Image: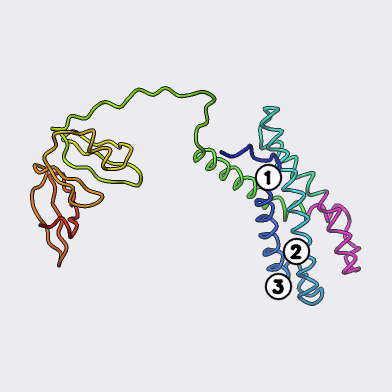
Amino acid sequence: MTGPRPLLGTAREWAIDLSVATAMGAFLGMVGPFGSYFNGPFLVRAIYWIGCFWAGTLIFGLLIRLAAVAAERARIPAPILVAAAILVGSALQAAVVAPAATGLWPFLNKLSPLDWYGQCLAFSGPLAVGFTILRARLAAQRAAAAPLVVDGPVSTPPPTPIPAATVLYLKMEDHYVRVRTETGSRLEAGPMARVLANLSGLDGLQVHRSWWVARRAVVGVERDGRNLRLRLADGEAAPIARASVA
């Protein structure tokens, strides 16, 4: 049983975000977009772009997570708060990026604060939207896969007994046994021996460690080299263990 997830993300999530930011920054340092290819050697460009992506990851990652929490608690539409987070985050990113860029390349002093803000908004806004959508989908997947936790004991009715005369075969599936009858099938908690013990009076044989077959379910035998399989009434083929061939 695990505890509640941190509101601002786990250390693993942040590590993944920053690793992706590092890879993207290194790539942009290599290709040199927006004319930065001519602004010095690769190492300088890579350090600049990795720094920009780290700043954006920390700023937007924090603001978008806070927006998601606020939207849930205040019942405000999430897109509104995410849009506000992107607008604020672009200003914060511009405040970090502009001094770094002009320090490395003084000729960029000709750009105004509004120019820097517009560039950060145009570049980081779509990335932030994509991050928000991906994060929402991952959260939905985790919620769907999470087990249902209840505070008190759960009372479940016992399963309906299966008439032994209707059973065609039993088949192991992971930690369960599929009981195939003339009218359908259902899963029972394993192991096989436990399920067989609850079905007395069966006329058949366990032909494999994961298969028990009723005699009347067999319609033929298939041979594939030295391997034998029983062809069953519903079209299934049950393998026969070497020890059970005779």
Q: Which is nearer the eye, 20 or 168? A: 168
Front: mark 1 or 3 = 1
Mark toward the start of the polypeptide (1 vs 3): 1
Please give the name of the residue rendered at 62% of the width and 38% of the height, measured from the top-left corner: 3
Mark toward the start of the polypeptide (2 vs 3): 3
Mark toward the start of the polypeptide (1 vs 2): 1
Instruction: Locate the N terminus by quadrant.
Output: top right
Q: CA distance from mark 1 to mark 2?
A: 21 Å
Colouring scheme applied when the structure was drawn:
rainbow
Residue 165 place in picture, x, y as percent: 13, 32
Residue 9, which numbered label? 1
Q: The disc labelled 3 sits on which kind of residue?
A: Met
Please say if 111 is above or below 89.
below
The furthest residue to the bottom: 41
Please tell me in which quadrant of the rendered image residue 178 appears.
top left
Please give the range of residues in magenta. Answer: 92-118
Residue 50, which numbered label? 2
Please give the name of the residue rendered at 17% of the width and 63% of the height, measured from the top-left corner: 227
Q: The disc labelled 1 sits on which kind of residue?
A: Gly
- In this image, 149 relative to 234: left or right? right
Element under disc 1:
loop
Residue under label 3, please give it.
30
Q: The disc labelled 2 sits on which kind of residue?
A: Ile
